[in-house]
Each structure stands twice: as C-alpha cells, then as structure tokens.
Amino acid sequence: NIKVWPNPASGVVNMMLEGDLPAGNVNADIFNMRGEKVMTVILNHERRCAFDLADQPAGVYLLQVITGNQRFVERIIRR
C-alpha cells in the first residue's frame, strides 16, 4: 500500500510505501488527466519521497507506483 498526504495539496505531496520494501528500485510516476506523465521519482530502497506539484496547474493527478508485480494508484488533487 501507499500513503499520500496532504491531499488536496497546493505544493509538496508526500508519499510513503507501507509494508515490505521491494528488492529493487521503485518508480513513482505522476500523470495528469490527459494521461501525460508530468513527473517521475525513483526510490532507491527508500520508503518515503516528496513531489513538488507547485509548478503544475490545479486539477486531478494520478500517482502510480509499481513495485515488482504490484501496482498502486492514488488520486491527488492539486489546488
């Protein structure tokens, strides 16, 4: 599972992986509602990261995290 806060956000959004850490790197991608990837963060055996959405327009974004054979998607609202 992943935890995302604050949501809605006006700038920095934090993300934390819950449970066991995967063996390799984890990509965390943020997509706008047109399906365009606007940001990628690579977690190198880390549990937490932060995304700065301050430069993105207000709207709804999707955070997708793929860990091995699992895929998590969370909706983020940018104010």
Image (cartoon, rainbow, N blue to C red):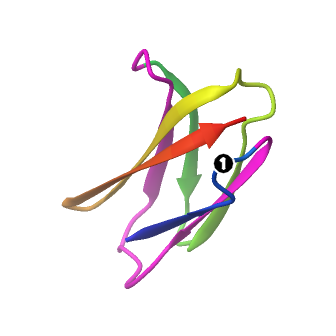
Between 29 and 54, the one lying in front of the other is 54
Question: Where does residue 71 sit, x and y in percent of width and height?
Answer: 27, 55
**Against 3, is 20 above or below?**
below
The residue tagged 1 is 8
Q: How many marks?
A: 1
- Return the x and y of residue 1 as percentages of the image width and height: 37, 71
Is 20 magenta? The answer is: yes
Density class for disc 1 (Cα within 10 Å; few <14, some 14-19, many ≥20) is: some
Question: Which quarter of the figure has residue 19?
Answer: bottom left
Give residue 24's quadrant in the image: bottom left
- Which residue is at the far left? 69
Residue 76 placement: quadrant: top right
In the image, farthest residue toward the top:
34
Residue drawn at 72 percent across, 47 percent down? 9
Type of amino acid at the residue the image marks with label 1: Pro
Query: Is residue 21 shown in magenta?
Result: yes
Above or below for 19 versus 10: below
Q: Position of residue 66 (x, y in %)?
A: 33, 54
Q: Considering the numbered disc 1 on the image, is that residue within a helix, a strand or a loop?
A: loop
Q: Residue at x 35, y 74 (%)?
A: 23
Residue at 69% across, 25% down: 58
Would you say 16 lies left or right of 69 here? Answer: right
* Residue 20, above or below 23: below
At horizontal 80% and vertical 33% (from top left) the residue drawn is 54
Location of the C terminus by quadrant is top right
Residue 35, how many percent across, how many down?
39, 20
For the record, the magenta segment spans 10-35
